[in-house]
Structures are given as structure tokens and as C-alpha cells.
Image: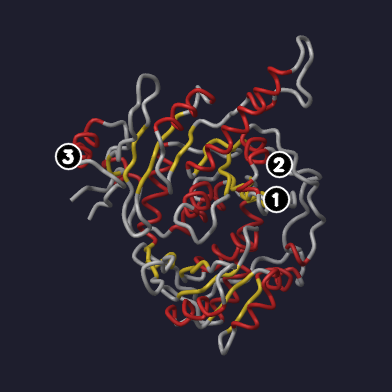
């Protein structure tokens, strides 16, 4: 059934069907024409590997490292090859332990290419909870980043455990011209196979896993791309914890659209100056490190500086959006406090926000915050989405101008319905 919006009024629910029929959302026929329920998410990524292998796919803002689609695909193959050898196949659940990093993304896509479903594990969870999750998943394989190598060994307990960076180093040990490991008899997933399992917080009892199929995630990212098309050279910033239900939009939308994914550095999701600088194209990442086995020597030598990409759309929880807008206000006050004819140190870089769209979700969006967003960002659209991990989303384009007393629950996104 349809998700119930927080504090929704009865008239909201009655308006859902009317709003859907009169909205500018993608018509259901468009989704039917261009999206197949049998197509797994990983195949959408693979299509861009084939069509535009040299396009920028992934940037780590914390290190300055970057990967093209071809480089990222070769890294993903190294991980998938090992996982298939360990028995990963469609609907096999693979717990993943990683901080926000390239290893996290490569691990996710490696699991999917092997046919399995990823299960993100919060690194802050106590071992007792992690072991409970592993038991519920009947996990036979664990995958993690180098930063959690010791914890992986402690949690292993009869399961196979792999470290992403080690698999990349092993893949790089062969000739640099060698192809990625052969896929052999790998059985690719279908749209009805699982893509991920997110575990609930457990605040009302034992944590339970929410299972999502490829077709559900593919439908959602297809809807995002139809609604707000991304192009090569454009990007989405990833800042939400990978155990949280918004993360899959940030990660899979750009990488199934031929655009780039920008990984915020550790703590970047709480740093308003970083978020604002990245949004305005004023962030200066560190010089990229030399390619090494730890970072995946299989990959080709990168450029001397990270590639330039434009963050074209943002997914914000409202509290993060408020934090960024408050930082803009602080900079405006500093500019006003400067004496006449005196420039603000560092210039007014924060006045340029090239993104086209802000999407809010995860918390209630207040009318005052929406007004503030339009005041600070007059050229940007704002859309509010609502829906639990296990349900479909509703969406509402926040109208610009005029009095706004409350935020509507909106209408089901194209392809969904209220029942």
C-alpha cells in the first residue's frame, strides 16, 4: 500500500490521485517505454561502461582520487570474481562493512555484479548487533574495506571474508594490459532478485531486514533520471550513511545515468563550509595520490588533479539543508559588515550555486525552510519526497512564491499508486 505521510491530513490523501493526474511528473507511459522491470541495476551501470568508458564515474573528495567508468568497472570485476568463487549468486546476502569511500562503492557494485545483494553494516553497531544481522542473513561471505580489516577477522567465525583493497591489489598483480578476470559462468541477477537489505533501527524490537529487489531500485533511479536528467560531467554528492534509505538514490542515480558520484570526505556531511563549497564549485580537493595496490593499482594512472564536475542535484535531509543555508547567511552578514569598497576575504564564491535541483527527504520539511531555500537559491527547484524504505515514494514540487503554510504529502511518483 501507499506510505502514510507524517501528520498527513485527510485532504492530502484525497488529493494524491488528482495531483498525480495534473502534475508534471513523468507519465506512467514514459516509464513503461524506457524502463524494464527485468533489468537489474548493475546492467544500467554496465551500459555506460560500454557507451562512455572514459567518463568520470567516481571522485573521493577526501583523497582527490578519481575513477572513470572503465576503471571503476575493472575494479568491480576484481571484487565480483572473488565473490563468485566464494559462492555468491543471485539472492545471496553479502554484509558490507566500509566507511564512505571508493572501497564502499566498489564493494557494493562488486556484490551486485556477482549477483548478490549487499547488506550495509553500520561501523558503529556493537558486535552483538552485527552478529545478529549476519545470522539473519545466513551470511557465508563478508566484504569490507581495509580500515575494518581487524574487525572483519573478529566477525568472520567460519565465513569467508574479503578486503576490497586486497582484491584490487591481487587484480593489479598481473600485467597492466591484462583484461579483468573472466566472468565465466556468472549468473547475472534479474529484476526480481534482491539488490539490498537494509536493517531497521530496532527501536521497537529486534532489528529486521527490509528486502528490496532490483526492479524496485531500478524504477526509482529511472524516475529520478527521467525527472531531473544528469549528463556526463555532472555529479551527485554522496553524504548520507549507506545504512540509511536515502543513500541508494545518491549512489545509484548518477552511476546508472552516466554521471559522476562525488564522495564527501569523512565528516563532510556535518561540515556546512565543505557542503557549500562543493555545491558552489569552490571546493579544492587534495592532489590525487599515486596509484598503488592499496588504492587499486589495476587502475590507469590518473590526471595530476581531480577532474572538474558540476554537482547538478542535491539530496538533503532538511536539517542539512538548513545548516548550509545558515552558512550562506553568515557569509552574507560578513560581506555586509565589510567596509564599502572592501572585498570579502576569499571573494563571494558562495553566490554561485550551479545545481538545478534540491530534493529533500528523511525529515519533515518546514514551510519556513522552503521559503528560505527559495530566497537563497532563486534559480533552483525544490521537491520534497516521503516514503519508508519498504514502500514507494510520494513527491511534491514545492511551489515558488506566495504564502506557503505547510508542505503537502504530494503524489505517488510515476509508476506508483495510492491504495
Instruction: Give the Cα separation between the discs numbered 2 and 3.
Output: 48 Å
Provide residue 164's location: percent of width, then percent of height.
65, 69
Residue tagged by mark 1?
66
Q: Nearer the viewer, residue 289 or 351?
A: 351
Instruction: Give the Cα separation between the discs numbered 1 and 3.
Output: 48 Å
| Labels 2 & 1 near each other (Cβ < 8 A) | yes
Q: Residue at x 63, y 54 (%)?
A: 70
Q: Mark 1: which secondary structure?
A: strand
Instruction: Give the Cα separation between the discs numbered 2 and 1.
Output: 8 Å
**Mark 1 or mark 3, earlier in chain:** 3
Q: Nearer the viewer, residue 364 or 86?
A: 364
Taking the image as shown, residue 122 lies to the left or right of residue 417, namely right
**Mark 2 or mark 3, earlier in chain:** 3
Q: Residue at x 49, y 68 (%)?
A: 118
Residue tagged by mark 2?
307
Q: Mark 2: which secondary structure?
A: loop
Residue tagged by mark 3?
14
Above-or-below relation of 233 to 345:
below
Q: Residue at x 48, y 45 (%)?
A: 317
Taking the image as shown, residue 91 lies to the left or right of residue 331, namely left
Q: Mark 3: which secondary structure?
A: helix
**Mark 2 or mark 1, earlier in chain:** 1
Q: Nearer the viewer, residue 90 or 54?
A: 90
Q: Residues within 10 Å of mark 2 (few under 14, many from 20)?
A: some
Provide residue 68's location: percent of width, then percent of height.
65, 50
- Quarter that holds the N terminus: bottom left
Amino acid at each position: 500500500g501507499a506510505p502514510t505521510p507524517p501528520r498527513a491530513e485527510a485532504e492530502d490523501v484525497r488529493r494524491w490521485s488528482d495531483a498525480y493526474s495534473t502534475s508534471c511528473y513523468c507519465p506512467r507511459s514514459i516509464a513503461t517505454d524506457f524502463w524494464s522491470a527485468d533489468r537489474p541495476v548493475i546492467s544500467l551501470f554496465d551500459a555506460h561502461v560500454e557507451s562512455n568508458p572514459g567518463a568520470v564515474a567516481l571522485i573521493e573528495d577526501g583523497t582527490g582520487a578519481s575513477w572513470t567508468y572503465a576503471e571503476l568497472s575493472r575494479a568491480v570485476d576484481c571484487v565480483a570474481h572473488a565473490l563468485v568463487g566464494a559462492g555468491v549468486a543471485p539472492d545471496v546476502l553479502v554484509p558490507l562493512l566500509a566507511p564512505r569511500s571508493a572501497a564502499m562503492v566498489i564493494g557494493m557494485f562488486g556484490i551486485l555484479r556477482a549477483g548478490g545483494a549487499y547488506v550495509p553494516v553500520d561501523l558503529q553497531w556493537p558486535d552483538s548487533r552485527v552478529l545478529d544481522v549476519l545470522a539473519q542473513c545466513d551470511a557465508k561471505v563478508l566484504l569490507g574495506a581495509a580500515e575494518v580489516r581487524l574487525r572483519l577477522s573478529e566477525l568472520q567465525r567460519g565465513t569467508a571474508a574479503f578486503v576490497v583493497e586486497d582484491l584490487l591489489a591481487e587484480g593489479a598483480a598481473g600485467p597492466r594490459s591484462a583484461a579483468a578476470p573472466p566472468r565465466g559462468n556468472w549468473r547475472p541477477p534479474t529484476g526480481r532478485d534482491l539488490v539490498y537489505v537494509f536493517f531497521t533501527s530496532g527501536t521497537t524490537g529486534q532489528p529486521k531486514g527490509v528486502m528490496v529487489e532490483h526492479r524496485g531500485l531500478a524504477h526509482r533511479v529511472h524516475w529520478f533520471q527521467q525527472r531531473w536528467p544528469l549528463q556526463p560531467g555532472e555529479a551527485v554528492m554522496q553524504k548520507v550513511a549507506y545504512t540509511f534509505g536515502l543513500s541508494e538514490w545518491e549512489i545509484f542515480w548518477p552511476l546508472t545515468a552516466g554521471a559522476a558520484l562525488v564522495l564527501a570526505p569523512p565528516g563532510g556531511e556535518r561540515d556546512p563550509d565543505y557542503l557549500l563549497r562543493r555545491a558552489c564549485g569552490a571546493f579544492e580537493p587534495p592532489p590525487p595520490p599515486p596509484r598503488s595496490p592499496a588504492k587499486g593499482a589495476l587502475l590507469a594512472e590518473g590526471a595530476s588533479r581531480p577532474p572538474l564536475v558540476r554537482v547538478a542535484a542535491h539530496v538533503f535531509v532538511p536539517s542539512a539543508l538548513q545548516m548550509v543555508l545558515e552558512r550562506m547567511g553568515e557569509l552574507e552578514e560578513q560581506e555586509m559588515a565589510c567596509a564599502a569598497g572592501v572585498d570579502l576575504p576569499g571573494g563571494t564564491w558562495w553566490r554561485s550555486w550551479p545545481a538545478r535541483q534540491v530534493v529533500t527527504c528523511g525529515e519533515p520539511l518546514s514551510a519556513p525552510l522552503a521559503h528560505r531555500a527559495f530566497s537563497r537559491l532563486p534559480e533552483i527547484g525544490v521537491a520534497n519526497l516521503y516514503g519508508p524504505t519498504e514502500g514507494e515514494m510520494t513527491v511534491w514540487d514545492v511551489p515558488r512564491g506566495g504564502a506557503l503554510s505547510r508542505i503537502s504529502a504530494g503524489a505517488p511518483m510515476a509508476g506508483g499508486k495510492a491504495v
